[in-house]
Image: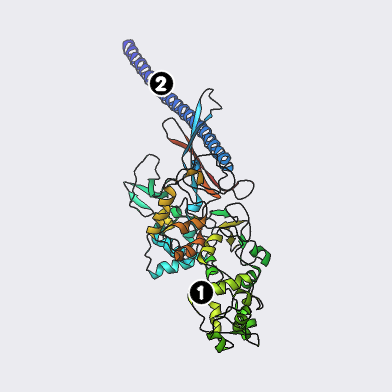
Amino acid sequence: MKQSVKWVFQVFHQEQHGLSLVSTLWILTILSILATQLLYSIHIEQRTQRNFLDRAKFHYAAKAGFEWTLARMRGDQTPFDSLGESWAEPIEGQVEDGIQVGNFLNYRVRITDEASKVNVNAADVGLISNLLAQVGASQDDALTQELANKIVEGQPYRTVRDLARVEGMTSELLYGVQQSGGFTQTSTIAPNANTIFSTANSSNSQATATDRQPGLVDLATIYSVDTNTDPNGQPLVNINTAGTEELTKINGQQNQPVFTQAEAESLIQQRDFDKLGALIDVQAVSDEIFNNIQDRLTTEDADEDTEEEETNNPQQQNMQQQSENGQVNINTADVETFETLPGIDQGIAERIVNHRDTQGFFQNIDAIKDVKMLTQQEFIGIVDKITLKDGDTRSGLININTAPPEILALLPGMDPQKAEAIVTHREAEAPDTSQVGAGLPSPYEEEIKGNPFTSISQLAELAEIDFGTFREVVDWVTQRSHGYRIEANGVDMTNKTISTCIGIIDRTGNEIRIQYWRQD
């Protein structure tokens, strides 16, 4: 009996010892798991802290690149803005790491001229239709025209992406989205190139697709802006509101006044221009002036007998030009005789005589209204000095020195061949670099590549740009810009972008203003 009890006790003791051992092992296992999880959590937290620290450091590296670029843009004093200037090249630099002594952080900056895009807040229906066709819409489709009308009716927009609210807008037209290789691609216009390219929005992919249609977000803007000044920095003259004195101070290419007193008054009587090109159709003799003098005009000589006789006598010639009742024969009168008429001065008189000498005799007195105020060369000579807008700035102009040919070809009167001619001119080696910007203020502190346009009038020098095209396109173009998109990236040693700052600036005033800001 005692032996049986002892055996039971031994078995029970052994079982208890085994359970204790198993329990101990379980506890050790649980503790090990907990320790592993704790270490993993600590590792994750440390890694998160390092990532946060890296992002913070590279954010300030990107911000440093942005601020350095602002300082650089403040120093840009050229009266034109072209892809041949240093700002158009990608900028790379370093900033000292404020935490790790002796370490430097890299940044990379890219600048895009907003005037190389179409401003959807300033474009008319025709330009919007052309832009929609560029992003894949059918130009002959009635729906495209309807969409263009609705876009114009919805102006102004706060961002280009606000176009998504316009009835009929599609994601393909707005974003140019295309699926390729499992990721989404969107296109961009290169800031220092004349081609449209696409880049994947995945940071791990380098795939490109050059055959895709871009979207409106790539080709449009709301931030393009220019100052309302001529290439010399002087305020432009608004020909719709300027007084006689202002108009008579407008000088042409030979630095001579273009309008006389009477011409300026005649212009004022006729003006209500919606395009600069309308100036070329302005009458030298306005309807108001004609109504005042028509009773004194004739196309018949007072004495037909004396008309047939040749004479060198000035008094007899004057009798041929004016009848006894004071009528002036517009087919024989000289400048001095025309000046005797009210509202006609030497300027208008010379234009009448020049027209008669080149076009032939007037068939009736009403034909005197066919005499134009300006010649084509005079118009070309003043386009850089006149405007239709008041205020300090003008929005929506396309920079002929930076816009790609795809954008230039969309403008009124333009086509791909004319657009390529503009690009070829601005990229060509200047015949004489000392003549780039000749006659304009402030010497350039940097070497300018290519042959940029320093005025709009230079467009007329291109063989491919006829006068009809010139008069249509002058309302839409400029040779400079004051609105830029700055994208600054903080990049690590493997050239991977860690942080990005994007800002759109306006430098029309004394201080640069940031119109838009985003940081990633």
Between marks 2 and 1, how big is the CA–CA gap?
114 Å
Residue identified by numbered label 2: 28
Q: Circle 1: is it few (<14), some (14-19), or many (20+) Cα within 10 Å?
A: few
The residue tagged with tag 1: helix, strand or loop?
helix
Residue 267 seen in the current view: no
Identify which residue is drawn at 45% across, 32% down: 492
Comparing marks 2 and 1, which lies closer to the viewer? 1
Report if residue 312 is visible in the image: yes
Query: In which quadrant is the N terminus drawn?
Result: top left
Q: Which residue position holds label 1?
A: 357
Which kind of residue does numbered mark 1 sit on?
Answer: Asp
Q: Residue at x 42, y 33 (%)?
A: 495
| 433 is higher (above) or lower (below) than 17 | below
Give the residue type that dot 2 points to.
Leu
The image position of residue 283, as x and y in percent, is: 56, 74
In the picture provided, is 478 more to the left or to the right than 140? right
Residue 73: x %, y % from top left: 56, 42
Query: Foreground: 198 or 72?
Result: 72
Left or right: where does residue 299 sit relative to residue 137? right
Q: Earlier in the sequence, mark 2 or mark 1?
A: 2
- Residue nearest the viewer, comparing 350 with 287: 350
